Image (spheres, helix red, strand yellow):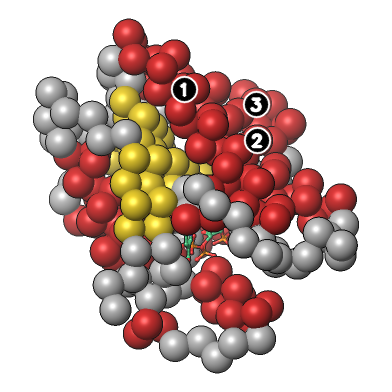
Amino acid sequence: MSAMATHVITGAGAGIGAAVARRLLARGDDLVLLARDAGRAKELAGEFAGARTLVGDLAEPDRLSWAFSHQSLPERVDSLLHIAGVVDLGPVGDLTTRTWRHQLEVNLIAPAELTRLFLPQLRVARGHVVFVNSGAGLSASAEWGAYAASKHGVKALADALRQEEHAAGVRVTSVYPGRTATAMQEKVHRQEGKTYDAARWIDPDSVATTILTALDLPRDAHVTDLTVRPGH
Ligand SMILES: NC(=O)c1ccc[n+]([C@@H]2O[C@H](COP(=O)([O-])OP(=O)(O)OC[C@H]3O[C@@H](n4cnc5c(N)ncnc54)[C@H](OP(=O)(O)O)[C@@H]3O)[C@@H](O)[C@H]2O)c1
């Protein structure tokens, strides 16, 4: 990828997304960070000096197009990094439509809509779309139904998009991390009733390294899928 590439990133405020944003900013790339609201955008602009922000709530994908029509969008997008996500565990017997819908909106429909909105810029740049998926996107365990369904859905989105955009030179990568030491994983442990020990899980910076490896490969190579598991 050329110097001064422009990356649109969701989820840069925490966890894996923050690790990716720090690494890209440190090497001088241009960042456009999606924030859920204006207050969060201000915090992100303070945290990542020189980054631009875009306001859009991923829990309301129907409104993203309207929200962006009132903001200036980057003219060039070399990569669109879908990293934001939400999780809520529970058995199918207890999960409400509200819980189902929230995970499907944030984890699946919003990435689809964001991809649609940025595809013209991605095609011009022969850019790269990265979906941070999950082991739960490949197999579903008890109590993970809604989250796993959203992640299985985003696998389908990525696989279809890869075939559709191949001729346009747009690359599509899915990354499937195992348990990673972030606030999301702390919540999962609370919901599982387990004690959380960050040292047991993948460092978010290692997931960032994986994502950057896929992004930085020369054009002769296209990493389609990467599974990353805890090493100990
Ligand atoms: N941690 C794991 O064990 C693990 C394993 C496999 C896959 N993953 C996946 O990795 C990705 C990143 O997870 P993480 O562990 O880094 O999570 P995290 O620390 O909880 O961070 C999630 C990020 O998503 C953003 N976000 C959530 N809802 C949003 C909304 N409605 N609008 C805009 N932004 C929203 C959050 O914004 P705020 O900062 O404003 O809250 C935050 O920046 C997710 O897709 C997750 O499913 C995580």
| Quadrant location, the C terminus | bottom left
**Residue at point 44% right, 48% down?**
132
Depth check, front residue: 15 or 21: 15
Q: In this view, does 149 lie to the left or right of 16?
A: right
Q: Is residue 170 above or below residue 18?
A: above
Residue 181 in percent (x, y) is at 42, 74
Residue 42 in percent (x, y) is at 52, 56
Amino acid type at image mark 1: Leu
Q: Does the residue labelled 3 lie within 8 Å of ligand 1?
A: no
Q: Which of marks 1 and 3 is nearer the N terminus?
A: 3
Residue 79 in percent (x, y) is at 34, 33
Element on which disc 2 rests: helix
**Residue at point 42% right, 63% down?**
178
Between the residue at mark 1 and the residue at mark 2, the CA separation in whole angstroms equals 14 Å
Q: Is residue 204 left or right of residue 190?
A: left
Q: In this view, does 89 lie above or below 225?
A: below
| Quadrant location, the N terminus | top left
Q: Disc number at residue 101?
A: none
Image quarter of residue 209: bottom left
Amino acid type at image mark 2: Ile
Between the residue at mark 2 and the residue at mark 3, the CA separation in whole angstroms equals 13 Å
